[in-house]
Structure formats: structure tokens, C-alpha cells
Amino acid sequence: MEPNIVDRNPVPPMSVTTMYLLDSDHISLIHRGGAEGQRIRARMIDTPPEQISLCIITYEEQVRGWLAEIAKARSVAQQKPRYEELRRMLDLYCGTPILPLDDAAIDVFQSLGCIV
């Protein structure tokens, strides 16, 4: 039996002193490849992989966005590159720890003045 995504993408250990949590804006900037995206990519290359995480909310936003792009396509030829991007995004998320939206995350989020 193949391990599930949770087994393959455990939450990083708490002993890490610095952790980078990439959000949807970071992922979009990297995807566009402009100057800001290149700066983020360069910093990621210089950062140990165990210090980089994504959030389940970012995953949801990215999936929703690519599914909307696929739905807008009017032909299979237009869908093809969008499905390729969806697959590329899935590969990124399968290879990067994904943090949950748990009670602790909600508490921190709300302490920053945000509403969930």
C-alpha cells in the first residue's frame, strides 16, 4: 500500500528556528517568473527544503484557480496547457510540507487581526 500525502508530507519539526510559509501570492509570482518571482525563487534555492512550507489554504486557492481556468477553456487544445499547469502545481504540493488550518493556526491568524 502506497503512503498517503500526509505520510509523504509531514509537518516540519518544531525545532526549526526559521520557516518560510509561502502563500498564494508567492506561488503566483514564482509562476509568472518576473523580477519578484525570481527573487523568491533565489531565496528558496538558498534555503534548506525543510524550512519551506505551504498552507492548505494556498493549495485550495491554487486548485480553485486552475480549475476555473480549465472551465473557461473552449477546446481540448486550450485545456491542455491548463491541465499541465494543474499537474505542475500538484507536483509542487506533493513535494512540499503542507501545514493544516488547525486551531493553533486559527488562533495566530485571529491574533493578527484577521477573520476566519
Image: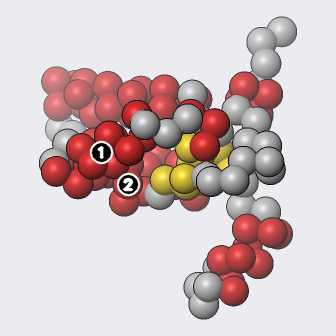
Give the alpha-carbon distance from disc 2 to disc 1, as whole Å: 6 Å
- Callout 2: few (<14), some (14-19), or many (20+) C-alpha neighbours within 10 Å? some
Disc 2 is placed on an element classified as helix
Given the image, on which type of amino acid does mark 1 rest? Ile
Residue extending furthest top? Answer: 1
Judge by depth and name the residue closer to the eye, 6 or 67: 6
Tell me: 78 left or right of 71.
Answer: left
Disc 1 is placed on an element classified as helix
Image x and y of residue 5, in percent: 71, 29
Tell me: 13 left or right of 84.
Answer: right
Image x and y of residue 4, in percent: 76, 25
Judge by depth and name the residue closer to the eye, 76 or 95: 95
Residue tagged 2: 26
Given the image, on which type of amino acid does mark 2 rest? His
Q: Quadrant of the C terminus?
A: bottom right
Image x and y of residue 67, in percent: 39, 44
8 versus 105 height, above or below: above
CB within 8 Å, label 2 to label 1: yes
Q: Residue at x 40, y 34 (%)?
A: 45
